[in-house]
Image (cartoon, rainbow, N blue to C red):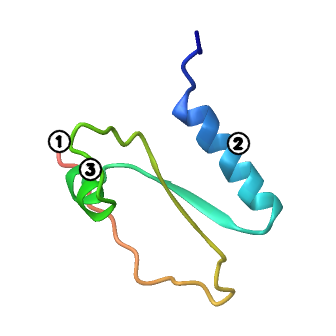
Amino acid sequence: MKKPVSAGLVAHNFMISMAAINYDTCPMENFDSLRIKKILHLPASSEINMILGCGIRDEQGAYGERFRVYFKK
C-alpha cells in the first residue's frame, strides 16, 4: 500500500530543482479551479492542489505601480 504524498513537499522539491537550473517559480493560491480544469481538459472530479508558475526572470523586471487595499476595522 502506497503512502500519500504531500503536495507541499513535492512542490518544495520541484521549486528547489528549478532554482538549481536557474528558473524562478511562484506558487499561486486562490485560483479558479473550474477554469483551470476546463483549460487543461481535466474531468470535473479531478482535484487541483497547487499551481506553480515557472520561468526565467527578465533582468529589467516586470514591475508596475504597487498599491495596498487597507483593511477597515
Viewer-proximal residue among 20 and 38: 38
The mark that comes first in sequence, 1 or 3, is 3
Q: Mark 1 highlights which residue? A: 73
The mark that comes first in sequence, 2 or 3, is 2
Quadrant where the C terminus sits is top left
Residue 4 point in image, percent of width and height: 54, 19
Above or below, comparing residue 30 to residue 20 in the picture: above
Residue 21 point in image, percent of width and height: 80, 65
Q: Secondary structure at mark 3?
A: helix
Q: Mark 3 highlights which residue? A: 33
Residue 29 point in image, percent of width and height: 38, 49
Viewer-proximal residue among 11 and 66: 11
Quadrant where the N terminus sits is top right
Q: Secondary structure at mark 1?
A: loop
Q: Amino acid at mark 3?
A: Ser
Residue in view at x 65 percent, y 42 percent: 12
Asked whether disc 2 touches disc 1, contact meaning CB atoms under 8 Å apart, the reply is no
Q: CA distance from mark 2 to mark 3?
A: 23 Å
The mark that comes first in sequence, 2 or 1, is 2
Q: CA distance from mark 1 to mark 3?
A: 31 Å
Q: Mark 2 highlights which residue? A: 13
Q: For the residue carrying disc 3, how many other residues have a C-alpha within 10 Å: few (<14), some (14-19), or many (20+)?
A: some
Q: Secondary structure at mark 2?
A: helix
Q: For the residue carrying disc 1, how many other residues have a C-alpha within 10 Å: few (<14), some (14-19), or many (20+)?
A: few
Viewer-proximal residue among 27 and 62: 27
**Eye-nearest disc, 2 or 1:** 2
Relative to 19, 32 lies left or right:
left
